[in-house]
Amino acid sequence: MDGKLDWLAAGLPTEGTNAQLPRAGTVARRDVPTCRLDELLGPVRERVREARWDACVVVNDERVVFGLLRKAQLERDADESIERVMRPGPSTFRPHVPIAEMAAFMVSHNLASSPITTSDGRLVGLIRREDAVQAAHELHAGKEQTPWKRKTGPA
Amino acid sequence: MPHEIHERREVQALMDRGAQIVEVLPLDEFEEDHLPGAIHIPLSAIETEARRLLDPSRPVVVYCWDTA
């Protein structure tokens, strides 16, 4: 283990004040549909629709992320392979990213959704911008009611 | 005899077997996030506090932020 950062990036549990705060990994939706590179789009699209999702993450057997399918990709021809239609190498984020930071980034970069992965590249879930923004808002609203201790100087 | 650990699974296995987990980062960083069951001994005090706080009969895992 390469330090606490590696432990956090793997989405492993911690203790402490931050452990109770929402982070990218806790807000990410773990029920996001997944598919493999060698599948055809038609059956995958059907599966995504039945799950009432508008996105799908392309992973291998170890849930390592290879790509992402959003609305435009899901509307392609049914006989095309996932490998051909997917958006390869999507930007991913680690589970321990604070939710306010995550929400701000998604808004400023107009990201509708993003896979959250461990440091090994394994899928934790898909975070949607609206979920991140709402969680950040709720956290902020909670902080306004309960003052948080602020750092006042160097350690 | 101390040695470096680079696999999380090895740390988890040691934790399951009752290893003592020690974080040497500043106290405020420890209070924000630490490994489950970890105790705090700042690096500056490790040589003196380790003898007082740790059980010499059990393995000890010491960690900081990263390998840099």
Image (spheres, coloured by chain):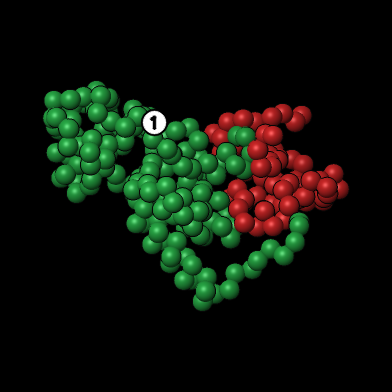
Question: Looking at the picture, does residue A147 appear above or below residue B20?
Answer: below
Image quadrant where residue A73 sits = top left
Mark 1 residue type: Gly
**Residue at 46% from the left image edge and 42% from the top image edge:** A93
Q: Which chain is red?
A: B
Q: Image check: A114 left or right of A38?
A: right
Q: Nearer the viewer, residue B56 or A70?
A: A70
**Residue A114 in view (yes/no):** yes
Along the line of sight, the residue nearer the viewer: A55 or A27: A55
Q: Which residue is mark 1?
A: A89
Residue B51 visible in the displayed image: no
Residue at far bottom of view? A145
Given residues A17 and A127, the one toward you in this image is: A127
Which x, y percent locates residue A65? 37, 32
Residue drawn at (46%, 71%) of the image: A141
Residue most extreme to the right? B48
Q: In the drawing, does residue A19 fall left or right of residue A151? A: left
- Coordinates of residue A1 in the picture (x, y in percent): 60, 34
The N terminus of chain B sits in image quarter: top right
The x, y position of residue B42, in whole percent, is 77, 50
Q: Nearer the viewer, residue B65 or A42?
A: A42
Image coordinates of residue A153 in percent, x first then y, are 75, 61
- The image shows residue A43, relative to residue A12, as above or below, that is above
Query: Could you say whether the residue bearing mark 1 is in a helix, strand or loop?
Result: loop
Mark 1 is surrounded, within 10 Å at the Cα level, by few (under 14), some (14 to 19) or many (20 or more) other residues, namely: few
Chain letter matching colour green = A
Disc 1 chain ID: A
Q: Describe residue A62's horizontal placement relative to residue A5 as left or right.
A: left
Q: Residue at x 62, y 50 (%)?
A: B34
In percent of the image, x 72 and y 65: which residue is there? A152
Number of numbered discs overlaid on the protein picture: 1
